[in-house]
Image (tube, rainbow, N blue to C red):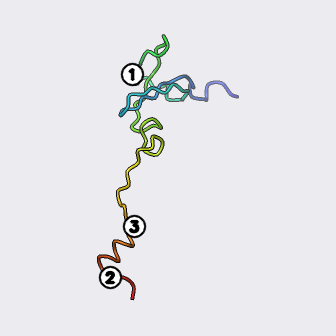
Amino acid sequence: MQHGIHPQYDEVVFRDRSTGDLIVTRSTLASRSDLATVQVGGRSLPVVDVDVTSHSHGFWTGTTRTLDSEGRVQRFERRYGGRS
């Protein structure tokens, strides 16, 4: 591996905006200087705010909502009549 051409790969914290959960992982985003820091386990790590994680996404939490309880075809047929 050549030195000096690869981005810095260090620990970073991803924070879920809706739940506030913290996920510590490694990323190349750690090299950005505009990131705020947060104390985790006695260490100061850069934090990246994200909108959705597995802690808040409806598929993973089991709280998905069905917006259309009947299908689009059935609604179309009810509105405009069935096939002739």
Extreme residue in the top direction: 42
Extreme residue in the bottom direction: 84
Q: Which SS class for mark 2?
A: loop
- Where residue 50 sits: x, y (%)? 41, 34
Amino acid, disc 3: Gly
- Where residue 34 sits: x, y (%)? 39, 24
- Where residue 2 sits: x, y (%)? 68, 28
Q: Nearer the viewer, residue 13 or 77?
A: 77
Residue indicated by mark 1: 36
Residue indicated by mark 2: 81
The earlier-in-sequence mark between 1 and 2 is: 1
Residue drawn 49% across and 27% down?
Answer: 23
Foreground tag (3 vs 1): 3
Residue drawn 45% across and 26% down?
Answer: 22
The earlier-in-sequence mark between 3 and 1 is: 1
Q: Quick check: 68 left or right of 32?
A: left
Residue drawn 50% across and 24% down?
Answer: 12
Examine the image and state in which quarter residue 71 appears: bottom left
Q: Nearer the viewer, residue 20 or 70?
A: 70
Q: Nearer the viewer, residue 38 or 35?
A: 38
**Label 2: how many Cα within 10 Å (few below 14, some 14–19, many 20+):** few
Amino acid, disc 1: Ala
Q: Which mark is residue 71?
A: 3
Q: Which SS class for mark 1?
A: strand
Q: Are marks 2 and 3 in contact (CB under 8 Å)?
A: no
Extreme residue in the left direction: 79
Examine the image and state in which quarter residue 11 appears: top right
In three-dimensional space, the C-alpha distance between marks 1 and 2, rounded to whole angstroms, equals 58 Å
Q: Nearer the viewer, residue 82 or 51?
A: 82
**Label 1: how many Cα within 10 Å (few below 14, some 14–19, many 20+):** few
In the rendered view, tell whether residue 16 sits above or below residue 61: above
Amino acid, disc 2: Gly
